[in-house]
Image (spheres, rainbow, N blue to C red):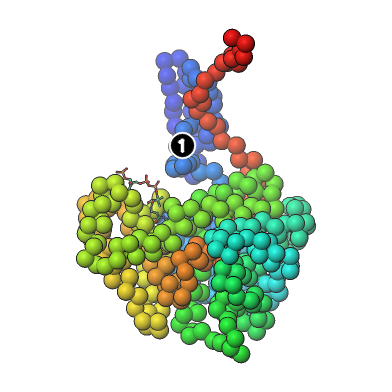
Amino acid sequence: MEQTLHLSSADQSAELAISNGTIPAKDLRAFSTPDGPLATYDPGLLNTAAVKSSVSFIDGDAGILEYRGYPIEQLAENSTFLEVAYLLLKGELPNPAELAEWERDINEHRLLHENVKQVIDSLRYDAHPMGKMMAAVSSLHTFYPDSRVLDSPQARTRNSMRLLGKMPTIAAWAYRHSLGRHWVYPDDDRGYVDNFLHMMFHQNEKRRQMDPRLERAVEILFILHAEHEQNCSTTAVRTVASANNDLYTSTVAGIGALYGPLHGGANEAVLKMLREIGSVDNVPEFVEGVKSGKGRLMGFGHRVYKNYDPRARIIKAAADDVFEVTGVNPLLAVALELEKIALDDEYFISRRLYPNVDFYSGLIYEALGLPPEMFTVMFAVPRTAGWLAQWEEQVTDPEQKIVRPKQIYTGHRGLTYPDASA
Ligand code: CMC
C-alpha cells in the first residue's frame, strides 16, 4: 500500500512520499518555517536512515541479527571467521574452492612492513593497545598509496584483503609491545584465528597448540563481532569514507569510535565493573546505585535491541566451553547474579535493558589470559570485516554524498569586536 505524509499549516501544505518506512528528508525543505526550510533535529541519529545497505539486518524487538540474510546463530554454529568475512565482503558464502583461495589470499597479507614496528615502538609500552592500533592502521595508507584510487575495484579489493590480513598482526604486536616481548611473525601453517593466538601468546616453545575449544570460542567471538549495521564505529567509517578517503584512513575512525566505553570499550568497562563489585553479595547494592543514577550497568542496554542481544546468548554458551578448559572465572557468578537481578527489576524491564554482546565476552578474554585493555582490540580485529564491507558500499553507492549534517545554531550573531582603546 502506497503511503504519503501530509503536512499542513495555516498557509501551506506538502505531500511527502513514504518509501521503505522513510520520507526523503530533503523534501521537508519544501515546507517553510519562520526559521527557514523545515528540517529534522535528531541527536544521535536515533530515527534517521542515512544509508541503504545489504550487509546485515537487525530486528531489535525480536532479537534477530542476520549477515547477508544468514541468521547469526547458524553462522556461529557452522562457519569460520574468514568464511563470514567472505560473505560480508562478497555478498555470498564461498564454495570450498573459493574459500581456500580466499584464505590463501588473506593469509598472504599478514606481514607488516617493518617500519610499522617503529610506529608501535615509538609509543610508550603502557600506551593503550587501541591507541597503538590506531597509530599503526593510520600509517598503512602511506605504504599502500594505491588505496587512494577509489575508482579501481581491483585496488579496493587488494587493500581490503591487506587490512583484513594485517589486523591480527597489528593487534598481536600491540599486545607484545606492552609486555616487552619479541615480535612474533605470522606462521604460514596456521589459520587466521590460530595464527593470531600464536602471535599473541607464543613464548619459546617449538610449537604450541591451544586447546581447540578455546580456539573455537575465539572464532565464534570473531564471527559475532564481525558486523552490526549502522553502529557508531561503522557510521564513523562511512563518514570519513564519504569524503572519498581510503579504507585505512576510514577504518582508523572506526577504531577510534569503537574505543569509547559506550561502544566497543564496554567489554573492558564490564570487567572493571565486575571486579569493583567483587562478590555476589555486593550485587544488590550496586544495582540500587545504578538505578539512583550512579553510573550505568555496563554490558546492558542497546540502541537497537530491545530484547536479549542474540550475540550475548551465543557468547554465554561459548563461555561454558571455555570455562571447561580454564576453570570457572569467579567473576562469572557476579555476572550471573547481576543479570538475574537486573532482568527481574522494574527499572531495567521498563527500559527494556538486556545483556548485550559485551556482557560476557570479557570473561572469556580474561580466561584466555588477556588483560582488559586488549578486549576492545579483540572486537576491532573482526569488526574490520564489517567496516570494510560497509566502506565498499559507501564508496560505490551513487546515492551517497559527503556527510555534512545541519545544526541548530544557538550562539550569538553579528557581535562587534571590542575596541582595544576604549
Ligand atoms: N544501565 C542503566 N541504565 C541504562 C543503561 C545501562 N546500561 N542503558 C540505558 N539506560 C537507561 C538510561 O539511563 C535511560 O533512562 P531514562 O529514560 O530514565 O533517562 C534509558 O535507559 C535509555 O537510555 P539511552 O541512553 O537513551 O539509550 P541509548 O540507546 O542512547 O544508549 C547504550 C544505548 C548502549 C549506549 C546504553 O544502553 C549504554 O550506555 N549501555 C552501557 C554501555 C554498553 O554496554 N555499551 C555496549 C553496547 S553493545 C556493543 C556495541 O555496540 O558496541
Residue that appears at 62% across and 14% down: 420
Q: Please, is residue 29 above or below residue 392 in the view?
A: above
Q: Residue 206: x and y, percent?
A: 61, 90
Q: Quick check: 182 left or right of 365?
A: right
Quadrant where the C terminus sits is: top right
Q: Residue 286: x and y, percent?
A: 26, 57
Disc 1 packing (10 Å; few <14; some 14–19; many ≥20): few
Q: Total marks drawn?
A: 1
Residue that appears at 66% across and 68% down: 166
Q: Quadrant of residue 355?
A: bottom left
Q: Quick check: 48 left or right of 305?
A: right
List the single residue furthest toward the top: 422
Q: Please, is residue 318 above or below residue 396 in the view?
A: below
List the single residue furthest toward the front: 421
Residue that appears at 54% across and 26% down: 29
Q: Is mark 1 within 8 Å of ligand 1?
A: no
Q: Nearer the viewer, residue 231 or 195?
A: 195
Q: Amino acid at mark 1?
A: Asp
Q: Residue 220: x and y, percent?
A: 48, 73
Q: Quick check: 17 left or right of 195?
A: left
Helix, strand or loop under label 1: loop
Quadrant where the N terminus sits is: top left
Q: Does residue 10 show up?
A: yes
Residue that appears at 60% across and 46% down: 239
Q: Please, is residue 242 above or below residue 38 in the view?
A: below
List the single residue furthest toward the bottom: 206
Q: Please, is residue 325 above or below residue 318 in the view?
A: below
Q: Which residue is identified by label 1? A: 42
Q: Does residue 52 show up?
A: no
Q: Residue 221: x and y, percent?
A: 47, 70
